[in-house]
């Protein structure tokens, strides 16, 4: 859970939002959001509200694919053409290799 809470906080800051801004975006009180960001354990429906407020989506990532997904997310700093090519490859077959059936 600490990694998820850190990602929430980092995403909020990257969007230039305050915890008070999340009150309006997620439809929860500032105190509730602050508590979630500091020590966690939110309900799933609350996490979905927070994700929407952060223009994000909740997904489950298999452990064996986590490194690849994190590398893909880190490509925001790379050249736009390279990121676009990788995005195209994923959109062609987003499930390829997910269950270990790489070709």
Image (cartoon, grey):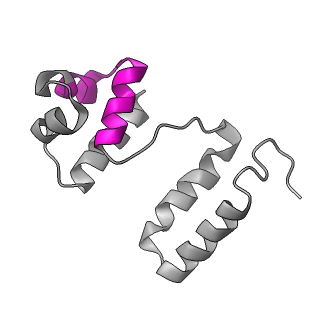
Left or right of 3, for residue 67 = right
Q: In x, y percent, where is residue 13?
A: 22, 50
Compared with 78, 51 (above or below) is: above
Question: Which span of residues is magenta-colored?
Answer: 33-53
Quadrant in the picture for residue 7: top left
* Front-lying residue, 27 or 77: 27
Q: In x, y percent, where is residue 66?
A: 61, 45
Residue at point 12%, 28% (across, down): 30
Q: In x, y percent, where is residue 29?
A: 14, 24
Q: Quadrant of the C terminus?
A: bottom right
Quadrant in the picture for residue 37: top left
* Front-lying residue, 22 or 71: 22
Left or right of 19, for residue 51 = right
In magenta segment, residue 38: yes
The rendered magenta stretch, by its main secondary structure, is classed as helix
Q: Quadrant of the N terminus?
A: top left
In magenta segment, residue 83: no
* Front-lying residue, 23 or 35: 23
Residue at point 69%, 54% (across, down): 94
Compared with 26, 87 (above or below) is: below
Q: In x, y percent, where is residue 98?
A: 75, 45
Left or right of 29, for residue 69 = right
């Amino acid at each position: 859970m600490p990694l998820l809470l850190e990602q929430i906080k980092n995403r909020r800051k990257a969007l230039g939002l305050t915890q008070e801004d999340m009150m309006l975006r997620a439809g929860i009180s500032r105190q509730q959001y602050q508590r979630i960001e500091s020590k966690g354990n939110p309900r799933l429906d609350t996490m979905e509200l927070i994700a929407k407020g952060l223009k994000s989506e909740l997904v489950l990532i298999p452990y064996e694919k986590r490194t690849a997904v994190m590398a893909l997310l880190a490509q925001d700093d790379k050249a736009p053409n390279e990121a676009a090519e990788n995005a195209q490859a994923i959109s062609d077959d987003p499930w390829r290799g997910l269950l270990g059936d790489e070709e």
